[in-house]
Image (cartoon, helix red, strand yellow):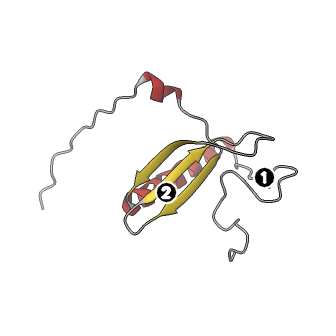
Amino acid sequence: MVQPPHQQLNIELGDKEAEGIYANLAMITHSPTEIIIDFARVMPRTPKARVLSRIIMTPMHAKLLYKALTENLKKFEGQFGEIKVHGAPHGISKPIGFEAPGESEGEDK
């Protein structure tokens, strides 16, 4: 079987995108054909947050992203130690921000 030649991909990063956007909240929803991730920033004592970025991808690309994140987090922890995940901020009855699988209320562990 003949392998197709390896094609190099040049990726450009504009000045605005290079600055990045800080997000501490991700809301994920899906349809049969798309995974939608909304990124927002929640500030202390502020009752609302605005979506800063929305990423829409196919379920296959979402799974590839999941695998890439898992691999990179393992490498990160191998270099810098385990990442500690703390509970909800003081005074907030329901967790906000990023949530690891199995941490939501009522979900089987």
Query: Considering depth in this image, is 59 or 2 the residue closer to the camera?
Result: 59
Circle 2: residue type: Tyr
Circle 1: residue type: His
Q: Is residue 79 left or right of residue 35?
A: right
Query: Considering depth in this image, is 11 or 55 the residue closer to the camera?
Result: 55
User: Can residue 62 be seen here?
Assistant: yes
- Label 2 sits on a secondary structure element that is helix
User: Can residue 75 be seen here?
Assistant: no
Sequence order check: which comes first, mark 2 or mark 1?
A: 2
Query: Where is residue 51 drawn, in percent x and y?
Result: 57, 44
- Residue in view at x 40 percent, y 62 percent: 59
Quadrant of the drawing holding the N terminus: bottom left
Pointer 1: residues within 10 angstroms few (<14), some, or many (20+)?
A: few
Q: Are marks 2 and 1 in contact (CB under 8 Å)?
A: no
- Label 1 sits on a secondary structure element that is loop
- Residue in view at x 67 percent, y 68 percent: 102
Q: Is residue 33 left or right of residue 77?
A: left
Query: Where is residue 26 drawn, in percent x and y?
Result: 59, 51
Quadrant of the drawing holding the C terminus: bottom right
Query: Residue 66's mark?
Result: 2
Pointer 2: residues within 10 angstroms few (<14), some, or many (20+)?
A: few
- Residue in view at x 45 percent, y 53 percent: 65
Which residue is farthest top? 15
The residue that mark 1 highlights is 86
- Residue in view at x 54 percent, y 58 percent: 28
Query: Where is residue 86 drawn, in percent x and y?
Result: 78, 52
